Amino acid sequence: MSPANEVRKSKAERTAEAREKARLIREAQLKKDKRNKLLIGWGIVAAVVAILAVVALVVTTSMQQNTPIADQGPVPANANVNGGVTLLANTEVKKTDPATVDMANVPAKPDTLPNPVVAPGAEAEAGQPVKIIAYIDFICPACLQFEKAYNETLTSLRNEGKITVEYRPLGFLDRLSSTNYSSRSANAAACVADKAPEKYAEYVNVLFDNQPAEGGAGLSDDKLKSLASDIGADINSCVDDKTFRPYVKYSTELAENTGITGTPTVFVDGKKWDGASDLNAEIQAAIDAKA
């Protein structure tokens, strides 16, 4: 049939068709809206589940990192009962005898501390290199600045046999992380002293190079293990087992009861550095006095 002969629809028919099309469009839109609402709903559910999973992981990790630490434990090989590892020339560390620590044996804090403070084992020894003892915390920004300022000189003098450098890592600033990072990192360093002592100085540097900000979780145990692995030290089981956390706990309380109130606290042949004077000059004076 030609267009000229097509039957023209009445106004009522055209109106009915338009209404039907509108109805179909509305129904399609309603179905689309319903489908979108379902997708959004399931998306919200999935997001909530994911958030809850992350929260659960964080809480679980925090609980694991904050579990009570035993009061007794071993001293790492190549470490002393005062909490320190002594670096000699190059990659050598001072050997020590096997020992254990017990919180019951930490000397009580005296009512009046000596002034100046005297650190155990820090006194000068005749005929021996000058002793540098540094109480540090791996999350302490001032300790990082100390390392940046003096590590090169200390390493040079140590390699020349003029000084020894003993690091005593503490858990002083555990309160500034949600996972006791200070103690965990000190434990990791103790693990390196025990398992790969020739890597100890390098690992101390690595921990400071990767120092996390205060107030967060700090580096994870996996990251601490990975950093050690990167320099050739396998401390995986030692970190997982928290082997030297009792040792760090003991060392930290011993330092507090000795009168160590912050980090870094540094001694040069038994004399406490005031933090303001020229440390290099003090060390050189101590070296010259033994010449």
Image: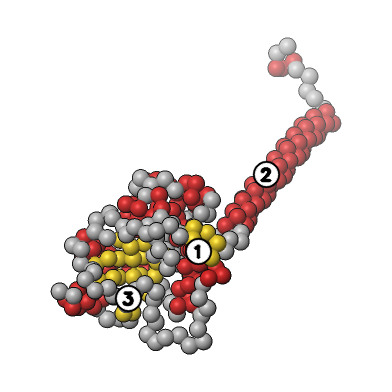
What amino acid type is highlighted by mark number 2? Ala
* Above-or-below relation of 29 to 287: above
Report the residue marked by disc 3: 123
Snapshot quadrant of residue 282: bottom left
Along the line of sight, which residue is nearer the eye, 136 or 208?
Answer: 136
- The tag earlier along the polypeptide, 3 or 2, is 2
* Above-or-below relation of 127 to 230: below
Q: Is residue 11 left or right of 96 when viewed as pictured?
A: right
Q: Residue furthest right?
A: 12
- State if disc 1 and disc 3 touch (CB < 8 Å): no
For residue 227, say whether it is visible.
no
- The tag earlier along the polypeptide, 3 or 1, is 1
Report the residue marked by disc 2: 46
Measure the C-alpha gap from mark 1 to mark 2.
Answer: 49 Å
Along the line of sight, which residue is nearer the eye, 108 or 69?
Answer: 108
Measure the C-alpha gap from mark 3 to mark 2.
Answer: 62 Å
At horizontal 42% and vertical 45% (from top left) the residue drawn is 234
Q: Is residue 79 left or right of 17 when viewed as pictured?
A: left
At horizontal 28% and vertical 75% (from top left) the residue drawn is 124
What amino acid type is highlighted by mark number 1? Val
Quarter of the picture containing the N terminus is: top right
Q: Residues within 10 Å of mark 2 (few under 14, many from 20)?
A: few
Q: Is residue 186 left or right of 26 when viewed as pictured?
A: left
Report the residue marked by disc 1: 101
What amino acid type is highlighted by mark number 3? Glu
Q: Position of residue 65 (x, y in %)?
A: 57, 57
Q: Residue furthest top?
A: 1
- The tag earlier along the polypeptide, 1 or 2, is 2
Q: Position of residue 241 (x, y in %)?
A: 54, 51
Q: Position of residue 33 (x, y in %)?
A: 73, 41
